[in-house]
Amino acid sequence: MNAAPDYCRQIEALRPVLLKFARLQLRNPAWAEDAVSETMLAALEKPQAFAGNSQLKTWLIGILKHKLIDQIRRNSRELSTTAASEDGEDLDDLMFTADGHWREMQHDWGNPEDALRQVDFMKVLEACVEKLPGQQGRLFMMREWLELESDEICKELAITPTNLWVMLHRARLRLRDCLQMNWFAGGAT
């Protein structure tokens, strides 16, 4: 790491903003921290990659978005039950009594085979998204999975709103075709 001290301080000053963004997307403090750490490490390892064509914050959030997606993929099966609720109360305390029993009777969780099919469907969907050409996959994930606003996506990718909607439409059509061929036509049944 041969980044200038001022560059390092600027990146460190943006850590709270990055962490807030990551926590909103991941809803898991540990995953958010990991994604932000990876983002900062990537920026510090290659300071020459920041060409100054945008604000440092915009550039770092661009890196962070990719790290969030990686984090989601890595941890897609993990569920955080130790996270605090919005009012700061531990979720375990909300769900269980002191002696370890459920506070409320639990609902039927459904058929495990249906749950497995849903996991399988998500794998097929993810594979279909990865097969999307050019920026379509990235754009689709930014809009549908990270739930970014259209104007933010347009700014990040330097495209017009019309171009965004055309590319999203094409991505959805390709995903529909891919899912039809690999899931609904009996490929995963």
Image (cartoon, rainbow, N blue to C red):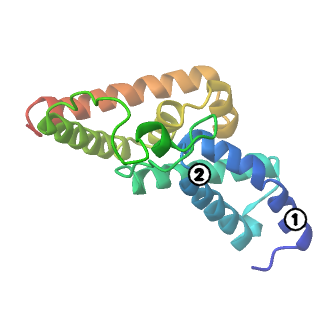
Residue at the (25%, 29%) spot, across then down: 177
Say what amino acid the circle numbered 2 marks: Pro
Quadrant for residue 85, please give it.
top right
Q: Which mark is residue 29?
A: 2
Residue 82 placement (x, y as % from top left): 49, 50
Q: Is residue 182 visible?
A: no
Judge depth for marks 2 and 1 and give the one in front: 2
Q: Secondary structure at mark 1?
A: helix
Q: Quadrant of the N terminus?
A: bottom right
Residue nearer the viewer, 187 or 21: 21
In this rendering, the answer to whether 45 lies above or below 183 is below
2 and 1 marks in contact (CB < 8 Å) = no
Q: Secondary structure at mark 2?
A: helix
Q: Crowding at label 1, few (<14), some or many (≥20) Cα neighbours within 10 Å?
A: few
Residue nearer the viewer, 163 or 35: 35
Counting residues from the start of the chain, the first of labels 2 and 1 encountered is 1
Quadrant for residue 31, please give it.
bottom right
Residue at the (59%, 32%) spot, across then down: 148
Residue 39 placement (x, y as % from top left): 65, 60
Q: Residue furthest right?
A: 6
Q: Residue furthest front?
A: 99
Q: Which mark is residue 9?
A: 1
Residue 84 placement (x, y as % from top left): 57, 44
Horizontal relation, residue 174 to residue 17: left or right: left
Horizontal relation, residue 80 to residue 62: left or right: left
Q: Quadrant of the C terminus?
A: top left
Q: Is residue 77 visible?
A: yes
Q: Crowding at label 2, few (<14), some or many (≥20) Cα neighbours within 10 Å?
A: some
Say what amino acid the circle numbered 1 marks: Arg
Q: CA distance from mark 2 to mark 1?
A: 23 Å
Horizontal relation, residue 97 to residue 10: left or right: left
